[in-house]
Image: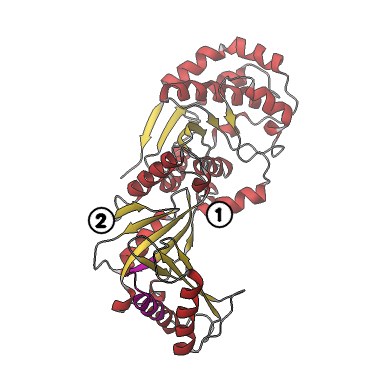
Amino acid sequence: MLDVTSVGTPAALGEPCVLLKLGEVVLKGKNREQFERRLQSNIRAALKDCGVRVDVRQRHGVIAVFLPAGTALESAQAVAQRVADVPGLVWVHLAHRVEKDPDAVTKAALALVESRLATGEGPRLPRFAVRSRRRDKRFPLRSNELDRMVGGEINDVFGLPVDLSHPELTVHIEVDRDEVFVFTDGLPGQGGLPVGVSGRALVLMSGGIDSPVAAYRMMRRGLRVDFLHFSGIPFTTTESIYKAYALVRSLDRFQGRSRLWVVPFGKAQQSIRASGQDRLAVITQRRLMLKTAEEVARRIRAGALVTGDSLGQVSSQTLQNITAQDHAVDMPVLRPLIGLDKIEIMAEARRIGTLGISELPDEDCCTLLAPRRAETRAKIEDLKQIERRLDAEDLAVQLADSLQEYKLDA
C-alpha cells in the first residue's frame, strides 16, 4: 500500500499524478493501439466514481493520469489504489510532475527524499540510487548525467550512501514530452491484458474457492466474464446465491459492470437422482450444467465457458471425466486452474480477496447428489443413455429459460 506520508508536500514537489506502466500490451504489433485504447477506457471507467476529475493521457509505453491542481495527496493515493486493480498494468506510481528544468528536478528529488526520511520508517540513512529515463531526447542532460547530478545533491545534503546494486531507496526520474515525473515507490499492478480485448466468456460460479480464481485469471487474459450460478432451490435456501453475489461483487473491481445469472437447479437434480445411476450422478449433473451454460452463453453472446477445475482434485476432475464433460458441449471450456494444486489456488484466492467469502458456510447444490462412491472413469455412451432418458437437451433449454439476473448494487 502506498504511504501518503512518504510523499513530501513542499511546493518543489509539484503536482501529484499517477503514472501507469504497461506490461504485455507494449509487445503487441500493429494492433497495439487497439489494446491501449481499451486499457484507457477501462481506466476511465474504474475511476469514474473516485470523486476526482481525471485526465488520462497515453504516452510512449506509459499512461499518465493527471489530477486537478491542488488535489490532496490522499485523493491521489485513492486514485492509485483503485487503478492498481485494472488488468493490463504492471506498476502504478504515485508521482509528481515538475518542469523540464534540471534545477526543478533536483529540488523535487530532494524534497521527496526529505519527506521519506521524515517518516522515520526504514534505516535512518538508507542506501539509495537514482534511476533516470529520458523519453524526450531533447532534454539537455542524458540519463546518466541526470543520475549523477541528482544523486550527488542527495548525497551532499543528506549524507546517504550510494548503492546502485541493492538500494533501500530509489528515486525515479522520467523525462517526458511536456514534464518530468519524480517518484519513489509504487504498487504492483495486475499485469495481463485489458479486460475486453479477448472477447466474452461465461464462468460457472459455485460458492467455492476455485471458480472465483478461475474468473480472475480469465479477466487478466482480456476476457470480460459473466457469472452463472446453479442454485439448489427449491431444496436449498438462498444462501448460496448470496455467497455467489458477494464473490461477484468482490471480483467486479477488476472489470466493472459484472453480471450474475442464477438457475434454480434443484428439480433437475431430483430427476438425475431418480434415474438410479448413483455413481454417474455427479458427472451427469456436470454435463447438464455445461449444456445449460452453453445455452445461456449463446443468449448473452459469450464465446466460451470457464470452470475452476483442477486436474485430479476431486473425482469429477479426472482426465477421463473431464473428457466426458467436454463431450457434452460444442463451446470451448476454459480451465485456467487445471495445473494448480489446492494450496496454490488458495494462495491466489487470498491475494485477490475472495478466500474469506468462499470459506463461509452455505448449502451447495452439488452436495445434493454426493454418492457414496463416485465414478472416476465415466464412459460417454453410459452418460448419453442417461441423458436420453432425462431428455437433457430440452431440459437444458428449460433451465436456461428459468434464468434470473441479479444486478450488482451501485
Q: Residue at label 1?
A: 350
Choose between 121 and 364: the one closer to the eye.
Answer: 121
| Span colored in magenta | 95-110
Q: Residues within 10 Å of mark 2 (few under 14, many from 20)?
A: some
User: What is the three-letter code of the residue carrying label 2?
Assistant: Arg
Q: Residues within 10 Å of mark 1 (few under 14, many from 20)?
A: some
Choose between 321 and 330: the one closer to the eye.
Answer: 330
Residue at 42% from the left image edge and 19% from the top image edge = 401
Residue at 38% from the left image edge and 45% from the top image edge = 42
| Residue 103 lies in the magenta-colored region | yes
Choose between 120 and 267: the one closer to the eye.
Answer: 120
Kindly state the secondary structure of the residue where label 1 is placed: helix
Is 390 on the left-hand or right-hand side of 247?
right
Which quadrant of the view contains residue 150? bottom left
The C terminus, quarter of image: top left
Residue 31 percent location from the top left of the image: 46, 37
Residue 291 percent location from the top left of the image: 54, 21
Q: Which mark is residue 62?
A: none
Q: Is residue 217 above or below residue 264?
A: below
The reply to whether callout 2 and callout 1 are in contact (CB within 8 Å) is no
Residue 46 percent location from the top left of the image: 36, 49
Q: Residue at label 2?
A: 53
| Residue 86 lies in the magenta-colored region | no
Label whose residue precedes the other's in the sequence (2 or 1): 2
Q: Is residue 143 above or below residue 229?
A: below
Task: Say how the picture is coloured.
Answer: secondary structure
User: What is the three-letter code of the residue carrying label 1?
Assistant: Arg
Q: Is residue 140 above or below residue 123?
A: above
